[in-house]
């Protein structure tokens, strides 16, 4: 591991905006902050919004900067990436943003029923091979995990450069008769003015420079209705 990464890992230990639980703390058991994020970490009762697979945390920090009355948590397994967002939040004095370094598979250990208001999934791994599609963060497997802690009808936002991930997620949403709030095959060619959707990360800027359209979908996730896989994915 390079000196730069080692330095960032050491600094993560000192930042009060970063939680790095061990495997033993979250495997088949609840993390001590479960159900207490707004009260104990943010010290308010504002809405709690998660960004899953947040990478460098650019989107998490951008959302927190725009909406001071809401609380934001970015989740990712890569500590060196999270450092960038955590450092930015610290330097900018943002009190409504924090980060959790963990695998998304363990997400149920962190949040209690009805604790989360919204989810953002920005430029996730599309897992395009058929045998890996169950690992998609917008697939039925993970949507059913989110149902355990999202408020009934809470919004899930997907932003991606990958057309098949976008169309497959939309098909899954429609198959399960979930309510679509907004959708776009190319947000910038359509001239969207929504500031939260228009936040651009390093990778998004690179995709745009290469002429790739950016897709967006938001839909309501019912807490009490199980999400079913599409038939062609289970046969």
Image (spheres, rainbow, N blue to C red):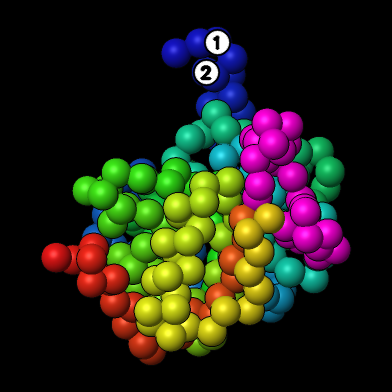
* Residue under label 2: 6
Q: Is residue 201 visible?
A: yes
**The N terminus appears in which quarter of the rendering?**
top left
The answer to whether residue 166 is above or below residue 11 is: below
- Residue 51's label in the rendered image is none
Q: CA distance from mark 2 to mark 1?
A: 5 Å
In the image shown, does 123 or 165 lie closer to the viewer?
A: 165
58 to the left or right of 105: right
Q: The residue tagged with tag 1: helix, strand or loop?
A: helix
**The C terminus appears in which quarter of the rendering?**
bottom left
Q: The residue tagged with tag 2: helix, strand or loop?
A: helix
Q: Is residue 148 visible?
A: no
117 to the left or right of 190: left
| Residue at point 63%, 59% (across, down) | 185
Mark 2 Cα-neighbour bin, 10 Å: few <14, some 14–19, many ≥20: few
Horizontal and vertical percent for residue 147? Answer: 41, 77
Horizontal and vertical percent for residue 91? Answer: 81, 38
Horizontal and vertical percent for residue 135? Answer: 32, 52
118 to the left or right of 132: right
| Residue at point 38%, 82% (across, down) | 176
Horizontal and vertical percent for residue 222? Answer: 45, 85
Magenta-drawn segment = 187-214
Quadrant in which residue 184 is drawn: bottom right
* Residue under label 1: 3
The residue lying furthest to the top in this view is 3
Q: Count up the numbered dots.
A: 2
* Label 2–label 1 contact, CB within 8 A: yes
In the image shown, does 77 or 215 lie closer to the viewer?
A: 215
The answer to whether residue 95 is above or below residue 217 is: above
Q: Is residue 83 a member of the stretch shown in magenta? A: no
């Amino acid at each position: 591991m390079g000196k730069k990464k080692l330095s960032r890992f050491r600094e993560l230990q000192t930042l009060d905006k970063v939680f790095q639980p061990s495997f033993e703390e979250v495997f088949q058991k609840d993390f001590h902050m479960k159900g207490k994020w707004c009260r104990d970490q943010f010290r308010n009762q504002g809405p709690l919004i998660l960004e899953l697979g947040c990478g460098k945390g650019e989107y998490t920090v951008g959302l927190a900067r725009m909406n001071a009355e809401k609380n934001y948590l970015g989740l990712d397994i890569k500590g060196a990436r999270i450092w960038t967002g955590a450092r930015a939040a610290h330097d900018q004095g943002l009190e409504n943003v924090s980060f959790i370094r963990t695998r998304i598979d363990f997400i149920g250990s962190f949040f209690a029923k009805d604790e989360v208001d919204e989810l953002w999934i920005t430029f996730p791994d599309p897992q395009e091979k058929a045998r890996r599609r169950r690992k998609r963060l917008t697939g039925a497997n993970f949507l059913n995990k989110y149902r355990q802690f999202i408020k009934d009808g809470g919004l899930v936002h997907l932003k991606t450069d990958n057309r098949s991930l976008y169309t497959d997620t939309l098909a899954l949403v429609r198959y399960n008769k979930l309510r679509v709030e907004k959708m776009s095959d190319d947000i910038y060619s359509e001239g969207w003015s929504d500031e939260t959707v228009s936040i651009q990360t390093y990778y998004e800027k690179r995709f745009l420079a290469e002429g790739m359209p950016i897709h967006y979908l938001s839909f309501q996730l019912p807490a009490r209705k199980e999400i079913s896989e599409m038939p062609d994915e289970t046969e």
